[in-house]
Each structure stands twice: as structure tokens, then as C-alpha cells.
Image: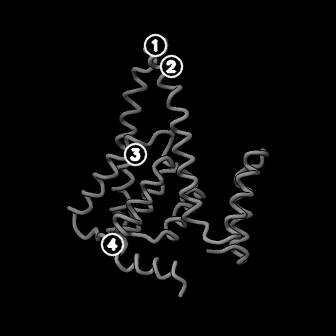
Amino acid sequence: MPPLLLAAAAEAASCTPVRLNDLGHLLQVMGTFLGLSLFSLGGGNTLLAEYHHLSVDQYCWLRPAQFADIYALAEAAPGPSSMIVGLLGMGAGWPEGPGWALLSAYGAEIAILLPSTLLMVVACLSWNRLRDSPWRVAFERGLGPITLGILFAVGVKILQTADTNAAGIGVSLLVCVLMLRTRISPLWFMAVAGGLGAFGLINR
């Protein structure tokens, strides 16, 4: 077996999944997502690297390939990008049964949405009163580069997680170039890449 595969197998063997088999563990995980919610600048995707760290490295619920599959499913489905949190919660609770999986899915989704939603409601109620304030202008201008930087880091993390061969890397780079140079809808890229995977032309 190649050394890289041996290292990956050893790492997987040493990682014991955290079981959500009681309410205490579930509340602990929900508390983690409650704290993350306030840092979702620019949308749920900005927290994707942290989701990966929690679910793959810290709690050991998923393998990297499984995380990439869940991310693709969450992006393809209609709805907000934070849907991935519900899927992660479902995957974490599934070993305890379907009922516990649904409970952990809803718990994780509520935890990631509730604090940021309440914060946005409070901000919107008072934001217009600061429309002429230089602090508001500076704040809005400063968040742009920060959000773009976070999204770039998230894109790199997804490429590292999903692309494990030359064909996958080539398709990803081609899509990046076309996205920047053309106005083709991303849905076409998703459909073509999905077709390539379905026919076995690209795989992990």
C-alpha cells in the first residue's frame, strides 16, 4: 500500500467518533455551533473550513470524502448554504438511530441560524440611523476584503478535500477559469461535472 494511503488509514484508525448518545453531548455540539454562528460573515460558506475541522478532525464524524459529498449535496439542493450544518448533524446522530439523527440535525441547524438571525434583526433596526456615520462606511468597506479572503480560503479547502487526482484538479481549474472569464451559469458546470462523475470519467 502506498505511504500516503497507509498514513490516511492510520489516522482514520486513531480517530474515534464522538457519539451523540446522550443529551449532554448533543448540547455540547449545539453550543459549539451557537458560537460559530456569530462569525458567519458573508454567509454560511465562510465557516466551511471550521465545519470540516469539527466534523472530520475534532469529532471524527466523517471522512474527508464524505464531507465533500455532503457539501456538494447541500450546494446542489435549494436553500441556504447553511443547510450543510443540518446534514452534518444528521450524519453525526445517525449511529444512534433515525430519530436521534433528526433531532441532532434540527438542533445543529437551529444553533447555527438563531444567533446570527437575532443579531441581524437587532442590527437592521438600528442600522439606518447610522447611515451617515463614518463608522458605518468604514465597517462596510472593511468587511468586503475580509469576506473575500475567507471565501478564498474555503475554496482552497474544498479543492484539497475533493480533488485527489489529476482529472479532478484539472476539472476544478477549468471551472475556475470559466467562472472568471464567462457568464455561464454555475448550474451548467455542476451538471457537467456530475455527469462526468456518473460515467466514471472523474472520481476520487
Task: Give the residue type that dot 4 points to.
Answer: Pro
Q: Name the residue under label 4.
A: 17
Q: Are marks 3 and 1 in contact (CB under 8 Å)?
A: no
Callout 2 secondary element: helix
Q: Position of residue 72 (x, y in %)?
A: 57, 61
Q: Distance between the residues labelled 3 and 1?
A: 29 Å
The answer to which quarter of the image holds residue 171 is bottom right
The residue type indicated by label 2 comes to Val
Q: What element carries label 1?
A: loop
**Where, quadrant-wise, is the C terminus in this rendering?**
bottom right
Q: Nearer the viewer, residue 10 or 134?
A: 10
Name the amino acid type tagged 3.
Answer: Leu
Q: Residue beneath label 3, please?
A: 113
Local crowd size for mark 2, using a 10 Å CA cut-off: few (<14), some (14–19), many (≥20): few
The residue identified by callout 2 is 137
Residue farthest top in this picture? 132
Q: What element carries label 3?
A: helix
Packing grade of label 3 (10 A; few <14, some 14-19, many >=20) is many
Q: Which of marks 3 and 2 is nearer the N terminus?
A: 3
Residue beneath the point at 43% across and 25% down: 124
Q: What residue type is labelled 1?
A: Ser
Reading the image, the residue beneath label 1 is: 133
Q: Where is residue 112 in the image (x, y as percent from the top left)?
A: 38, 48
Asked if 199 appears above or below 34 in the picture, the reply is: below
The structure residue drawn at horizontal position 51% and vertical position 26%, both measured from the top left corner, is 140
Residues at marks 2 and 1 touching, judged by CB atoms closer than 8 Å: yes
Q: Residue at x 33, y 56 (%)?
A: 107
